[in-house]
Image: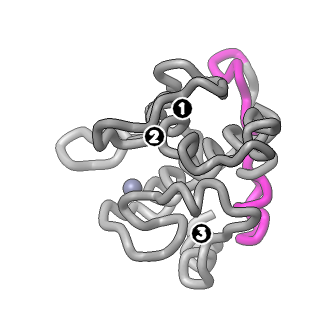
Amino acid sequence: MEAMGRELSALFALAGTEISVHQDAPIVYLGSTRHVLYVAFRGHCGFSAQIAPRTSQRVLARLATVDGKLQPLLTVDCDAVAETIAPHMAGDDRKRGDELYGRALGRVIAHEVFHWVAHRVNHNHSELFSEGMSARTLLADYTTFDSGELHVLRVNR
Ligand SMILES: [Zn+2]
């Protein structure tokens, strides 16, 4: 959770946006914030050394839609995220697997937050907003929204 929150803060700070993660959102006072997204995590949300590679093309996360309109309800498939990155992690990576996994979850969530804030259904070919986020992007030491995406985030924050 910490690594996930750190990554989200870092990704959105570049757009001048503060993002905060609350684990008890329904009972916490969120203040007068413009965007509130509810995130549901499915599957086993932890990293272990015995994660099999992904066998199916499961989506990592999705925003709910109603009549084609995006809704602020996001579902993350924790197993799909772990299975995507695990085969690309060397021994040293696995030793800090929890941290890298949390960071990857942050990037997956950032992608969905961009869908929501930008009100965009269609993807582009950037690192964070392409349709299938690669293990490389999820595991990279550093990634960022590109300048066009940062602009969109800044305008809609
Ligand atoms: Zn997407």
The residue depicted at 48 percent of the width and 19 percent of the height is 43
Contact, mark 3 vs mark 2 (Cβ under 8 Å): no
Residue 97 in view here? yes
Vertical order, 33 against 142 (above or below): above
> If the picture is divided into quarters, which one holds ligand 1?
bottom left
Question: What's the magenta region?
Answer: 9-27
Secondary element at image label 1? strand
- Toward the bottom, the furthest residue is 147
Residue 34 in the image: state x and y as whole percent. Answer: 62, 50
Residue 30 in the image: state x and y as whole percent. Answer: 73, 33
Secondary element at image label 3? helix
Contact, mark 2 vs mark 1 (Cβ under 8 Å): yes
Give the residue type at disc 2: Pro
Count the numbered circles shown.
Answer: 3
When asked about the image quadrant of residue 86, the answer is top right
Q: CA distance from mark 3 to mark 1?
A: 19 Å
Q: Mark 3 vs ligand 1: CB under 8 Å? A: no
Residue that carries the numbered disc 3 in the rendered image:
153
The residue depicted at 75 percent of the width and 51 percent of the height is 7
Residue that carries the numbered disc 1 in the rendered image:
38
- Toward the front, the furthest residue is 91
The residue depicted at 73 percent of the width and 38 percent of the height is 94
Task: Tell me the crowding category of disc 1: few under 14, some 14 to 19, or many 20 or more residues within 10 angstroms, Cα based.
Answer: some
Give the residue type at disc 1: Tyr
Residue that carries the numbered disc 2 in the rendered image:
72
Q: Earlier in the sequence, mark 3 or mark 1?
A: 1
- Quarter of the picture containing the N terminus is top right
* In this picture, residue 20 sits left or right of residue 108: right
Q: CA distance from mark 2 to mark 1?
A: 6 Å
- Quarter of the picture containing the C terminus is bottom right
Pick whichever, 42 or 147, lies toward us. Answer: 42
